[in-house]
Amino acid sequence: QVQLVESGGGLVQAGDSLRLSCAASGRTFSMSVMGWFRQAPGKEREFVAAVGSSGRRTYYADSVKGRFTISRDNAKNTVYLRMNSLEPEDTAVYYCAAKVGDVITTTRGDYHYWGQGTQVTVSS
């Protein structure tokens, strides 16, 4: 069992940066792929980024590649999402998710555990 709690969201201006954190509890954290998804009003929840269990492998959605960086600290049971050059289109609720096993996927249904989400709002 893994429990996830996100933090770090807020209201920023276009071009600003934010770092989201996701604190996980549960002994399987270090064996899990961790991902970030986001959901904008009226839209489906979409994949943003994922990191493998060791932190060496990462994968990003094209829309955030080069601007966002996902990382993890297994000693702290925490995964991060550094978001630079934020755009109004990045406005959404951001969710942390955990997937048992070490195969990175972008499919929402493959992730077994979810946080409650944190709001990110980017003004123009």
Image (spheres, grey):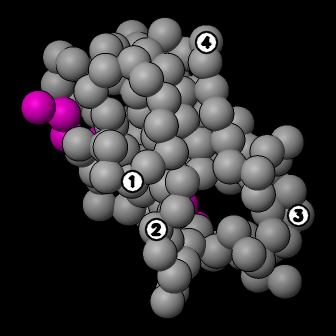
SS at circle 2: loop
Q: CA distance from mark 1 to mark 3?
A: 28 Å
Residue 34 image position (x, y, % from top left): 42, 33
Q: CA distance from mark 4 to mark 3?
A: 28 Å
Question: What residue is pinned by disc 4?
Answer: 56
N-terminal of the pair, mark 1 or mark 3, is 3
17 horizontally vs 10: left or right: right
Q: Give the number of the mark in front: 1 or 4.
A: 1
| Residue 16 shows up from this direction | no
SS at circle 3: loop
Q: Which mark is residue 108?
A: 1
N-terminal of the pair, mark 4 or mark 2, is 2
Residue type at the position of mark 3:
Gly
N-terminal of the pair, mark 3 or mark 2, is 3
Residue 12 image position (x, y, % from top left): 72, 70
Q: CA distance from mark 1 to mark 2?
A: 8 Å
The quadrant of the image that shows the N terminus is: top left
Residue type at the position of mark 4:
Arg
Mark 1 and mark 2 in contact? Answer it, CB < 8 Å: yes
Q: Which mark is residue 15?
A: 3
N-terminal of the pair, mark 1 or mark 2, is 2
Residue type at the position of mark 2:
Arg
